[in-house]
Amino acid sequence: MSSEAKCSKAQCDKFVAVNELAKRRGFFWSSFEIYGGSGGFVTYGPLGTRLKQNIEAKLRELVVKKIGIYEMESSVIAPAKVFEASGHVAHFKEPMVECQNCHTRFRADHLLEDKGISSAEAEKMSLDDIKVELERHEVICPDCKGKFSEPTRYLTMFETTIGPYSGSVGYGRPEAAQNIFVEFNRLYNVARERLPFGCINIGKALRNEISPRQGLIRLREFTIADLEFFFDPEEPACERLAEVENEVLPILLCDTRLKECEDVTNFTVREALDKGIIKNEWQAYFMAQAKRLLTELGVPASRQRFLEKLTWEKAHYSTQSFDQEVMVDRWGWVEVSGHAYRTDYDLTCHMKASGVDMTVYKEFPNPVETEELAVKPLMAKLGPVYKGEAAKAAAALAKVPAQQVADDMEKDGSILVEGYQIFKEQVEIGKQKTTVRGKRFVPHVVEPSFGCDRLFYVALEYAYGLKDDRVVLSFPRSIAPIQVGVYPLMGKDGMDTKAKEVQKLLACEGFMTEFDETGSIGRRYARADEAGIQLGITIDYDTLSDGTVTIRDRDSWQQVRAAIAELPKLLHLYFEGKINFESLGELIKVK
RNA sequence: GCGGUUGUAGUCUAGCUCGGUAGGACUCCAGCUUCCCAAGCUGGCUACCCGGGUUCAAAUCCCGGCAACCGCACCA
């Protein structure tokens, strides 16, 4: 490779540049390096940890504070039953065969589907069934016509045992969503039994990827933020829609995708709903909020889009799904969040598997009065006839529809059920009024799900820029890992002591600060820019006499002069986004 | 897991063909100096991915691992 190519690689490929910077400055690096490393695991260093926390804080601020979603936190390991019920055990164990000649691996069920076996059938098959079917259809390698190995299953969930008994299988969660569903009853109770409500669960998830790639984009252990929003399917209206109805969502529609075209269609939230592009208002609401979140993380709207998932791309639980994607330099569009309409799939699964009722009760606005034909066995008459069998006879009778009993009695004067002959005079048939005051149902769910490591990566990539051949990480000020750098112009004449005082003052005010006294002031500014430190405060000779400092802006390199006494107030306003840099003090000329 | 490419200080890299003291640049640290945008000088720390083999001698050659990148497959 020529030196020209290497040079252009470093400059043009942001992924390489960002990863190099991240490693060098301590944003993140791949874990376990001293033992040779292990793919798919990453360590966030001091700056990265700050940045990641700030991004997650931003998500919390939006979702928990502004929208009013609950938050929960729960374990990464779950008993096998949880993921058996959710369908993950079935869906994560993919039957695979490997060509013995060219060693290409194929999904065995997909090969069988090509032979006309339905995916539902293929999914249910045991490995032996699959082997038999593969042989019966004489399936050979589509690439080289080679023979296949025995089918094996590859489980993409991490499996473990809980406690000392090997029979107690546990899985590392591949998503945090199931924790919300299994705790639904308690959460609903905490929500004072009212719909709609949502709950977010932010934490680590594990997927034993066959081959993790692309740095932070695909990890084996990663941070997921799953938000499950529960609502009554008969009242799907989003009361907060007005907040976002004019937000434009660039959507790459299924129809467009099928034409192998990548053009997005812009819809306002309102239009997307009116035209039926998005089938649920809450889903549209969260998509709009997701777009705003990414914008606040520094990704311009023009570099975001929503991809409508094709039927066969959707997860097993979803009826309608969109991926929110962000354009990244190296790989093009990368998913940062998924928006799925999970209906009542998960709660229903857990109800069936656990036997626990997870329905909610809804009172009708007006009680519904119904009048139905009812058959009431007269036990006073049945008793003497059937003695100990009387109750069984009555139970048998209860299984027959009232209308049929009435018809038979009318025609024959009696009815024969399960060997009991019951006569007309032994029952009372009449209209019975019942009042239904409400009903029970399983709530529906829309799920926005964010990959926090991907949010982190895109925030880092979009912050990355060059100014005068120097790297500057221009984070939005709300996520800058370090807010203020404090520098003595020189480490002598009391400037260093004064600078430490200022740093302490700001740290006590709650700002994330860093003190740097080595190297020339220019070098320290350059270092700070590379770490994305939002503001630099420099203590010089004037500070010692008049108590003012220069404040330097990372992105414009402009400087203003302000009094130390004013700093806490000014900086709070600045970092809350209430004033801009120019309002921090008097602008001064820089050489 | 397969194929291709690759693996040398914190980072980028030279050296590998043809085995013989591992070199540079930047960063970092210390000192001097300078002081508002990576100045200068001096000094310093830090590396051949791991394990075998061949050899008097291996960064270099061979074998096996591991990891990264690209492609395939996978990505619920």
Image (cartoon, rainbow, N blue to C red):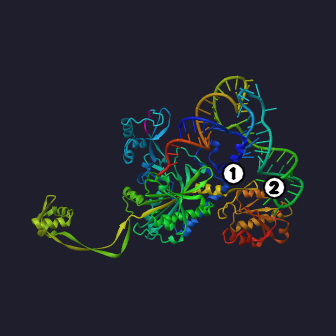
- Over which residues does the magenta segment extend? A147-151
Q: Is the C terminus of chain A in the top left, top right, bottom left or bottom right quadrant?
A: bottom right
- In the picture of the structure, the residue carrying the numbered disc 2 is A519
Q: How far apart in space, not on screen, are marks 1 and 2 (Cα)?
A: 20 Å
Q: Residue at x 37, y 69 (%)?
A: A361
- In the picture of the structure, the residue carrying the numbered disc 1 is A21
In the image, A492 versus A95, the foreground residue is A95
Q: Residues within 10 Å of mark 1 (few under 14, many from 20)?
A: some
Does A149 lie within the magenta span?
A: yes
> Would you say A303 lies left or right of A113 here?
right
Q: Residue at x 38, y 45 (%)?
A: A122
Q: Is the N terminus of chain A in the top left, top right, bottom left or bottom right quadrant?
A: top right
- Residue A501: x and y, percent? 77, 66
Provide the chain ID for the residue under circle 2.
A
Q: Amino acid at mark 2?
A: Gly
In the image, A504 versus A293, the foreground residue is A293
Residue at the outermost bottom position:
A366
Residue A383 seen in render = no
Q: Residue at x 37, y 65 (%)?
A: A441
In the image, A259 versus B16, the foreground residue is A259
Q: Residues within 10 Å of mark 2 (few under 14, many from 20)?
A: few
Provide the chain ID for the residue under circle 1.
A
Q: Provide the major secondary structure of the magenta segment.
A: loop
- Residue B22: x and y, percent? 78, 36
The quadrant in which residue B24 appears is top right
Helix, strand or loop under label 2:
loop
